[in-house]
Amino acid sequence: MKKTVLVLEDVTVAFGSKIVLKDISFEVREGEFWGIIGPNGGGKTTLLKTILGLIKPVKGTVSIMGLPPKEAVRKGYVGYLPQRIENYLPLSCEDVLSLVVSEKREIERLLELVGMKDKREQPFSSLSGGEKQRVLIAMVLAKKPRLLLLDEPNTGIDIVAQDAFYELLRRIKVEENVSILMVSHDVGVIVNFVDRVACLNRTLHYEGDPRGVLDCDLLKRLYGTDVEVFVHHPECKGCHVFRTS
Amino acid sequence: MPCVPDFLIVPLITAFVVAVSLSLLSFFVVLKRWAFLSVGVSHAAFGGIALGVLIGVSPEFTALGFGVVAAFLIAYFKRKGGFHEDITVGVLFSFFMAVGVVLFALSKSYITNAFSYLFGNLLMVSGGDFSFSVALLLVDCLFLWLKKRELLLLMMDEDMAYVYGVNVDFLYYALVFLVTINVVVAIKLVGVILVTALVVVPASVALKIAHRFWWVIFWSVFFGIVSTFSGITASLLWDLPPGATIALFCGILFFVSVLKRY
């Protein structure tokens, strides 16, 4: 049996009297790739910040490798990639990594891992969205985390670069033996790449096999209306539109 | 530069020291979108200056007190999301400015003193200001040198910086505090209304031409010095207020850099 990396037990988060997350429970095991989907304002980013220890739940507990979030973060067990980072940083790819790694050889290894070794001296601000995400993934991996938290890492990236990025994450998951929890809007894409899915809209509507997400009742309940999902397959073999109406 | 009378030498050197200090911090102000924060701080300081003049205490201390209170309120609400930054700055800026105008009116010295603080006056700069500016510049350099890595992570993303072990709250407010002191010190030179130009323009222009951190800092300082030198020269040649001429050259520099892009 694989080790448990992250455990959420009855986590409830409130801002004042407004409940943002209610009774969230799930477990992420070693080497699993999780996708978290749900509508805007459904609490996805709040969930990530709660796991990071930046928001304290009013009820329930979060534990990472058996530790409270802040301690796990301090020990370097958690890597985090936010939705957006400052775009005008005057740094090369190497400079970005040198903020968190001191050894030149390790910087090269990480850049090679994400396929960015050739662009190591290029200004970070001049890279495409997909390339920036690769450099940031390398940066996040520098601490050798056991759990990677990614907040909509593919916002503004074209679908080809997205496929390559998901493939990279799958490879990293195996090579670096890391568990990944990724928030995403792309229901139709995410189902092809992740091991498990959590559907979140204040409460957990579904948790399990990604194929189970393409269910009319579930998607209507999650988004509160009829939706169309473009189900994209790598190399576009069998791409189709899934409608709930 | 035209022939400089002896009594202007200390103020002029102080002007360059202040310009270098503000240019060093300009990078962080631009990346954190704090231009409006510096506006709020400088206008809040005006209230403090007026209080100092009225009660006979050194206006520098009261200005710093008002500036720090305003800066921390703006920064706190910006981070905690209680109000939009423009609302907080808008309210505090007009409130403290109004306090300043009322207090200056009560002190019966409104016209002469207020005008000097609003638009800057080289003649107000003393030997004490020079020493304090040099000490502040050293603190700025030391802070930048020692905290470069943490500051860059903070610029990238605050939550990400936290994950990398940065004490985000401390560093954020330390930077706010440093920017505030530098802005307040520069008020005598360029005035409440024009100080923002020296805080925002140098790095805005530098970021257009440089892609490495230390080069941005270098060009930022260079543009800060060039604007100050040009502004003071014009001020001495045509007997104009130096704050206004420095801000004018900052503006020209910015517009040239924008035009060059097209």
Image (cartoon, coloured by chain):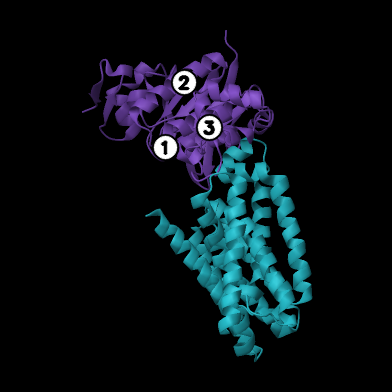
Q: In the rendered image, which quarter is residue A59 located in?
A: top right
Q: Position of residue A37 (x, y in %)?
A: 40, 29
A59 and A141: which is toward the camera:
A141
Chain B, hue in figure: cyan
Chain letter of the residue carrying label 2: A
Q: Does residue B17 appear left or right of residue B153 in this picture? A: right
Mark 3 nearby-residue class (10 Å; few <14, some 14–19, many ≥20): many
Q: Quadrant of the C terminus of chain A?
A: top left
Labels 3 and 2: the sequence-earlier one: 3
Residue that badge 3 annotates = A136
Residue B106 in view here: yes
**Amino acid at pointer 1:** Gly
Chain letter of the residue carrying label 3: A
Labels 2 and 1: the sequence-earlier one: 1
Q: Quadrant of the N terminus of chain A?
A: top right
A162 and B40: which is toward the camera:
A162
Compared to residue A99, the image places residue B5 above or below, namely: below
Q: Position of residue A200 (x, y in %)?
A: 42, 31
- Residue at 56% over, 40% down: A91
Q: In the rendered image, which quarter is residue A70 located in?
A: top right
| Distance in Å between CA atoms under marks 2 and 1 | 27 Å
**What number of labels is visible?**
3
Mark 2 nearby-residue class (10 Å; few <14, some 14–19, many ≥20): some
Chain coloured purple in this rendering: A
Residue that badge 2 annotates = A168
Do dots 2 and 1 share one subunit? yes
Q: Secondary structure at mark 1?
A: loop
